[in-house]
Amino acid sequence: MSLPIPIMPSTTPFSERIDRLHRLIASADRILIGAGAGLSAAAGLDYAGPDFEREFAPWIARYGITDLYSSSFYPFDTGEERWAYWARHIWFARFRPDGLPLYRQLRQLLAGKELFALTTNVDAQFEKAGFPTARIFATQGDYAYLQSRSGQPQTLIYNASWVTEAMAATRNCRIPSSLVPRHPSTGELMSPNLRCDATFVEDDHWHAQADAYHTFLDASCRGRLLLLEFGVGYNTPGIIRFPFERLTARHPEAILVRFNRDYPESSEVDPSRYVAFTEPIAEVIKKCQ
């Protein structure tokens, strides 16, 4: 079976694409945002670099970790080491930053529009920036919650107080055994609520937001739909990237705007209903304001 031939972005000048984006936002009946890791990276939530090196200096020296993403797979020998690391990881990505300026600027740019945000990010930046919580679907979890390792029961535990206590008690990259988190109902060891396998907990809130997303999609079948896709690559393309292309292809009044430095191409969308920006997302949003 032959694969679709990628449609490369046009060479339309930056200023003309900015003008078109202005018009598309103004005329859209509904706007669907799709956000991957590239948006938070553009906003300054860098998983490597000076902030990471400062906050994780003991772990870098002891374990040789190099960035927040790859270190999340590190095979720590003990639970005390693993959870000392994860307490700082969760704090660094979820509780340390306030709503970042780029997310706030995006909210201001889209103020007054009927919108929904679908994201694979687990840092709650849309919520922190003031997007309506009822219009956010974080499909892959939320750093602020823990779940049972087995995935049962289907409940989540808010972890802010545990993170604070564990960080304060960390010594030599370890926490006391008494702070290794266990589910309060079953006593089972816990995991961060991040989708990595079939044990991922989809609680009542997750299902409510999934329903809200599909309700928005159903309503979007009528009228002008603008899809804004930010920083979505090929790690989990089946959640945002490919569905956004298919939705645009079958919706006669939909237009896809893709913000992606490395992967701006499309495989399904008519070039006349597709705009690509490889320029920095922050620069594009600033020009649009």
Image (cartoon, rainbow, N blue to C red):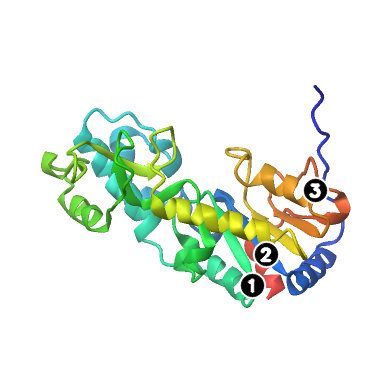
Q: Residue at 47% across / 46% down in the picture?
A: 140
Q: Is residue 200 above or below residue 207?
A: above
**3D distance between C-alphas at marks 2 and 1:** 8 Å
Q: Residue at 81% across / 38% down in the picture?
A: 6
Q: Position of residue 267 (x, y in %)?
A: 79, 40
Mark 3 vs mark 1: which is more N-terminal? 1
Label 2 Cα crowd, 10 Å radius (few <14 / some 14-19 / many 20+) = many
Q: Position of residue 49 (x, y in %)?
A: 46, 50
Mark 2 vs mark 3: which is more N-terminal? 2
Is 85 on the left or on the right of 108, as rendered?
Answer: left
**3D distance between C-alphas at marks 2 and 3:** 16 Å
Q: Quadrant of residue 111?
A: bottom right
Under mark 3, the amino acid is Ala
Which residue is disc 2 drawn over? 31
Judged by depth in the image, the label closer to the viewer, 2 or 1, is: 2
Label 1 Cα crowd, 10 Å radius (few <14 / some 14-19 / many 20+) = some
Q: Secondary structure at mark 2?
A: strand
Judged by depth in the image, the label closer to the viewer, 3 or 1, is: 3
Label 3 Cα crowd, 10 Å radius (few <14 / some 14-19 / many 20+) = some
Residue 262: in sight, yes or no? Answer: no
Which residue is disc 3 drawn over? 249
Q: Are marks 2 and 1 in contact (CB under 8 Å)?
A: yes
Q: Is residue 216 above or below residue 3?
A: below
Q: Secondary structure at mark 1?
A: loop
Image quarter in which the N terminus is found:
top right
Is 67 on the left or on the right of 63, as rendered?
Answer: right
**3D distance between C-alphas at marks 3 and 1:** 24 Å
Which residue is disc 1 drawn over? 110
Image quarter in which the C terminus is found:
bottom right
Under mark 2, the amino acid is Ile
Q: Nearer the viewer, residue 200 or 194?
A: 200
Q: Nearer the viewer, residue 275 or 49?
A: 275
